[in-house]
Structures are given as structure tokens and as C-alpha cells.
Amino acid sequence: MGVWSHPEISLEELLKLIKGFVDILILASGYQSSGHFAHWDPLNIKKAFQWGLFFENVLKSIDDNQDSVNELDAAVSELTSNPHFPQGLTHLSSVTLSKARYFILEHLIRTLPMRDSHIKAVLKATIDMDLEELQKTEINYLDVYIDKLKLQNEEGIMDFSPIPCPDDNLHVKVENDIKVDLTTFAIQGIKKRLLAVSHVSSIETSVNVLAKTITQVNSNDGLLHEEQNHPTAYVWNHWRTRTLSYLLDKRTIRLVSGARMIFSAPKVQWAQVFEQLDISKEGNTNFCETIELLLLGCISTRWDRIIQRFMSNSHEQPLGISTLYEGVHKLLLERFQNVDSMQQKQHSKKEQEIMEYLEVKLSNQIHHLWELSPALVAASLPPWSRLFEVYASELLSQFKGKTTKIRCCGCIDDNKEHIECEVVERIWCVYVFHVSKKQVVL
């Protein structure tokens, strides 16, 4: 039998309200379930704060009854352990509920993108809430409020100079029972958000400079090799430049970031997201973008090492096209013989789940892989997967001029050798990631 002892609300009723609170937090993160922006005006934000205040009062009333707190935590833990529960809120507990208004405010501040109208609405609602709280205990509540803001500003709490906020998490001050009003909390959070945006902007600028520098250097190297009559080196340089341009592109980096977020959830959740996109339909205009996102999910946690692999490849001696072919052909034979041991070697459960999902979705549409970056396909398809077998076998067949449903080039039709065509570029990418003796551990 339970030990819940709140006189006005049962644990079952409270849990129902907590589920509603979770919905509010999801909307506070910036988006509706449809994917559209969640609009928050000052009135709705105040209503959300009032929900938070309700939970704070409930927790305050049972604060001296540890058995009731433990029973609540056990019930909340069971709720958050459900695979369909939002993964970003799995740390929900009696502690976060006891500071529920700050928890809501933290989510509102982290909204992406944080528009000017949203900032104004957040500040107006927090100021109103603080004034209402002071009005309960102070006659000259407005003067008291202004004096508090002046004092905090003098102490540097509200200083807007570019110095990182000392707390990694906004709610640390609140959890440590240090008296922080909603206004101060909001301003500190907005300040930290602005600093983060500034840092991201600096990183984006650096990546753009790096991408341009690499392209220019590789282009110059390519011209040098061409002048020295090394056509193979020139072709490798061209492919490498194109690959690095894709890997360092702002769009690609954003997709990688999105993939990390999506695939941090259990399979039952991320699979549901993709099922809603209905990517199995051939006519879906977003089909290739969705497949690209799935492939990026396989390598998102090792993105820097993927780039490192191509960077290190720039120091390798270009090989003959026949050598590339033989290397991939040998790898394919090894796959047939040792597929089980390959699957067990240094591949995460998450990657296996994504591959299984892709194999079903691409079972009759394998040709879509040829619409994506050769480097992305090569890096994301592990040799043990069925997709790798089909993809590599198709490439080798095309190289040999065998009749296939997929055609990457017209070299055979024009009686030309495969030298600079897409077939060889894709074989080269597979060689770089899975065959080269200097390959780093991915």
C-alpha cells in the first residue's frame, strides 16, 4: 500500500497533471507536434508558470515526508522509463518539479530560434510573475523589485559583458536553494544563449574559412600534379576536394547535428519519426534527404574522424584504378567469408538498428544511394551490411561493363576506360574508408 500523504490531491491525479506538464514543456522547447513553431505570448507563459507554481506548492507541502517524495519519484521514474516518453525530459523528478517554474523558463529560453517577440514575451511574463509574488508580501513591491535589480546589477549578476555564465546548467543556482527570482534567471539564461550563438557563429566562420582554404590548397596541388603529368593524382585531388566540400558544408553539418539529436532516442521513437515521413513512397520529394539523414545518423558520432580520414588520405600515393578495383573486390570476398565477425567488430547497436531500418526501406530502391554523396555512402555503409554488399557489387559490375539497371556513367557505351567517371570515384571512396592500409580506426 502506498504512503502518499497529500491531503488535497491523490498520487494518481498528480501523475495525470504531470503528463500535462510534460506537454507544456515540449511546447516550451519551441515546436508543436506538427513541427510548426509553438507561439508563446505573455499570457500563455504566465499560465505555464502558474502550472509550475502549483507543482512547487505540492512538493513544498510534502517536503517533510520523505516517504511521499520517494513514492512520487518512483511513479515519475516509471513514467519516464516508457520508450515513448520524450528523451530530453527523462531527468524529470521531484527535484525538478519543486522548481517547476524555473524548469519551464529554462526550456523557453532554449527555444530555437529565439525570436525577438519571444524574448519580449518571456521577459514580460517573468516580470509580471515576480511582481505578483512581491505584491503578496511587500506594500511598495515595485520599488522593492527595482531595488533588487539595481543591487544585482551592481554585484555583476546582470552584467552583459562577454564572460561565460559560471553555471553549466541554468538550474544549478535554483537547486542549491540560492534565492534567484525569475527575472534574474531569465536574463542570465538569455545572456548565456547569446554567448552560445556568438560561439556557434565563430565556429561556422572558422569552418567556412577551413573549407575554402582546403579547396584552394587542393586545387593548387591538383594543378601542380597536372603540370607534372600525373593525371591520377589530379583526379584524386578533385574527388578529395569535392568530398571535403560536402563534409564541411553548413547544410551537412546541420544535418549531422540533427541526426545526433534524432538518434539519441530509442529506436521506437526515431523510427516513428521516419514512419510519419512515409519515406517508403517513391514519389516522396524528401525521400533522398531522409535517406541522407539516416546515413548521417550512422556516422554522426564519429564525424570528426570521417573528415580526418579524408585529410590523412591527402598524403597517400595515388594508386592505379585497377588497384582500387582489386582492393574493393577483395574486401567484398572477405565480407562473404567473415560477415558475422565483421558485424561484431566495433559497430554500435545504434548503427546496426539504422542499417536494419535502411535495408527494409531501400529493399527495392537501392538506386537512391547513387543520388547521394559518394563519400557519405562509402563512410556510412559498414562492410557487414547487406546494403554494402549490394552497393559494392553494383559498382564492380558497372566497372566491368556488365548490364545493370543502374548506370553511373557512359564509359562503356562510348568505348572509354573508367578514369574520371562517377563509378571510379565511388570505388575510390569505398577504398579510402574500408581498404586503405593507412586507414584510421573509425
Image: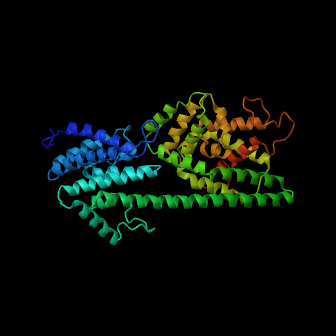
Q: How many marks?
A: 0
- The quadrant holding residue 268 is top left
Residue at x 46%, y 34% (from the top left corner): 272
The percent coordinates of residue 214 (x first, y second) are 69, 59
Residue at x 72%, y 47% (from the top left corner): 428
Left or right, 152 with respect to 274, comes to left
> In the depicted view, which residue is nearer to us: 110 or 329?
110
Residue at x 55%, y 52% (from the top left corner): 302
- The quadrant holding residue 405 is top right
The percent coordinates of residue 295 (x first, y second) are 58, 42
> In the depicted view, which residue is nearer to us: 403 or 142?
142
> In the depicted view, which residue is nearer to us: 125 or 241?
125
Left or right, 296 with respect to 241, comes to left
Q: Quadrant of the N terminus?
A: top left
- The quadrant holding residue 284 is top right
> In the depicted view, which residue is nearer to us: 130 or 54?
130
The percent coordinates of residue 222 (x first, y second) are 79, 57
Is 400 above or below relative to 129?
Answer: above
Which color scheme is applied? rainbow
Residue 281 in view: yes
Is 408 above or below relative to 176?
Answer: above
The percent coordinates of residue 319 (x first, y second) are 77, 52
Residue 169 in view: no
Is 187 above or below relative to 368?
Answer: below
Residue that protrudes farthest toward the bottom in the picture: 154
Residue at x 41%, y 42% (from the top left corner): 39
